[in-house]
Image (cartoon, rainbow, N blue to C red):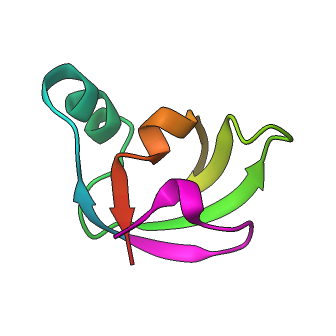
Amino acid sequence: MKTLRQAKIGDKVRVVKLHGEGAVKRRIMDMGITKGVEITVRKVAPLGDPIEISIRGYELSIRKADAEMIEIE
């Protein structure tokens, strides 16, 4: 299982599954990260947190903990 946290800068990936439960999963989905959507990794901060991604035509920064819950291919 590969997660968004393991993706490198410039990678284009597709979301396979969201892990997590309740409010955390709902917050990730509210940001537009849903199954099947394509994500481009734009930047990663020096210490790895946060990760800047491009999704559905806008830029988004997510925490490492959230990126760990997003399974990709």
Q: Can residue 9 be seen from the camera position used here?
A: yes
Of all residues, the one furthest to the front in this rendering is 1
Q: Residue at x 39, y 37 (%)?
A: 31
Residue 54 vertical placement versus 51 (above, below): below
Residue 46 vertical placement versus 63 (above, below): below
Q: Residue at x 73, y 42 (%)?
A: 48
Q: Nearer the viewer, residue 22 or 53?
A: 22
- Where in the figure is residue 25, as x and y percent of width and height? 23, 34
Which of the 4 image quadrants contains residue 14? Answer: bottom left
Location of the N terminus by quadrant is bottom left
- Where in the figure is residue 53, as x and y percent of width and height? 61, 52
Location of the C terminus by quadrant is bottom left
Q: Nearer the viewer, residue 68 or 50?
A: 68
Residue 31 vertical placement versus 32 (above, below): above
Q: How many marks?
A: 0
Looking at the image, residue 46 sits to the left or right of residue 25; the answer is: right
Q: Residue at x 30, y 34 (%)?
A: 30
Q: Residue at x 65, y 62 (%)?
A: 41
Which of the 4 image quadrants contains residue 16? Answer: bottom left
- Where in the figure is residue 18, as x and y percent of width and height? 24, 51
Residue 68 lies in the magenta stretch: no
Range of magenta residues? 1-14
